[in-house]
Amino acid sequence: MTEKSDCMQIPQMMDALGAAARTAAAQLALSSNAERNATLQSVAKLIRRRSEHIQAANQDDMRSATQKGLGAAMLDRLALDDARIEAMATGLEAIARLPDPVGRILAAWERPNGLQIQRVAVPLGVIGIIYESRPNVTADAAGLCLKSGNAVILRGGSESLRSNQVIYQCLHDGLSQAGIDPAAVQLVQTSDRDAVGYMLASMAGSIDVLIPRGGKGLVKRVQEEARIPVIGHLDGICHVYVHASADAAMAADIVVNAKMRRTGICGAAETLLVDRAAATGILPKILAALTDAGCTIKGDEDVQALFSPVEPASEEDWSTEYLDAVISCRIVDDIDQAIWHIGHYGSGHTESIVAGDAEAAAKFLAEVDSAIVLHNASTQFADGGEFGMGAEIGIATGRIHARGPVGAEQLTIYKYVVRGSGQVRP
């Protein structure tokens, strides 16, 4: 198909996907938890059985991406090996083991007139997910949507199209084997960027909510152009604050892990804040550990005076998401200044305090207004799988509907079920 004919047919193609997804969503919402679990287990088996086919398609994607000059971080996200494919399968099985998020009674009460009212969890409907690079998102996202009774339209990045197509076929066949309409999961099988634009602007009648997962450029475009509600986050400017009461060895371990375990994920720490009272005794050890791990450090004048080599930090650095082996570091006077810094420069994603003082930790956890706050733990735990959700579609930093890791429960909304015995309103 030529690019011109592709473009001409996008509205018809996308409208057909939307109509089929809407029909499938109505059926899926009435399915049982056992039926949805059977689907997830079937897909997991197919992914294992077709591992070689998935890796062959992924190798084609990797060659093309390398030729196009994609960076090392993007290539790492794109790559699939035996371990990552097995993780997809085990992730689906973990989702299947989760409690049924549909039909939960969230609240129940009786009115004086005898009306029995319940707030009951129901699926959102049709979810559109737009993502880049990571082909494992195809399985994770579809699995969470199926578990929560939602149909999903997946639009992966052009760099992972071949990998996504093979994984999608496993989903399609697993749905068929379980007797569920395969249109409950659909893949936009074109690399034409106009398909994304059409999803954002012209599918409000078919898609109930959009979830972007990818780089800042993608997420910003979705948030700015979408005419459909969006769940997600733009920046992951995460902080680790080392309080004066912190254990030095623990602080070094947590900071290095938070920054260096995987530098390209949204939960990677980008700024280190250290109490002035602890700077002389603790900070040089932390910075030495970071340097030994291959991290570049940008610091204020106080940090530069304590440790060499440290590059000067600019005002822009405090609000930069590096997604690389780079961290900015500032010495703060006290916990109040640390909390102010996070509120002023942060993105509301994930923040951690390292402290032995329980009162200081409690103050930080209560006053820092981010989606995830931790005490004596790495920011890289900002992950649905680590929270016991089986998997996640992403981290939400908004204030409407979902916040933090978006798992199966967060992909439900609710309705009110009211039972009476003949009551009429006077």
Image (tube, rainbow, N blue to C red):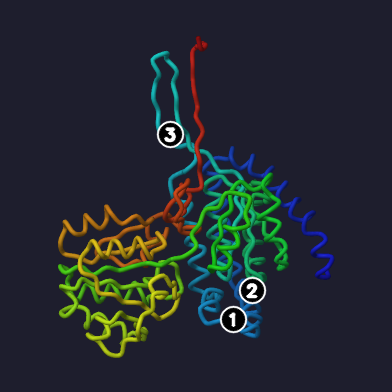
Q: CA distance from mark 2 to mark 3?
A: 42 Å
Label 3 environment density (alpha carbons within 10 Å; few <14, some 14–19, many ≥20):
some
Q: Position of residue 67 (x, y in %)?
A: 65, 85
| Mark 2, residue position | 159
Q: CA distance from mark 2 to mark 1?
A: 9 Å
Of circles 3 and 1, the one toward us is 1
Task: Say which residue appears at 44% left-offset and 79% top-offset.
Answer: 324
Q: Secondary structure at mark 1?
A: loop
Extreme bottom residue here?
A: 309
Task: Say which residue appears at 63% left-offset and 61% top-offset.
Answer: 170
| Mark 3, residue position | 105
Q: Nearer the viewer, residue 211 or 420?
A: 211
Ranked by sequence position, the earlier of labels 2 and 1 is 1
| Rendered image: mark on residue 54 | none
Q: Amino acid at mark 3?
A: Ile
Of circles 2 and 3, the one toward us is 2
Q: Position of residue 10 (x, y in %)?
A: 77, 59
Q: Amino acid at mark 1?
A: Leu
Q: Secondary structure at mark 3?
A: strand
Q: Amino acid at mark 2?
A: Glu
Q: Position of residue 286 (x, y in %)?
A: 25, 80
Q: Nearer the viewer, residue 100 or 365?
A: 365
- Image position of 64 (left or right of 88): right
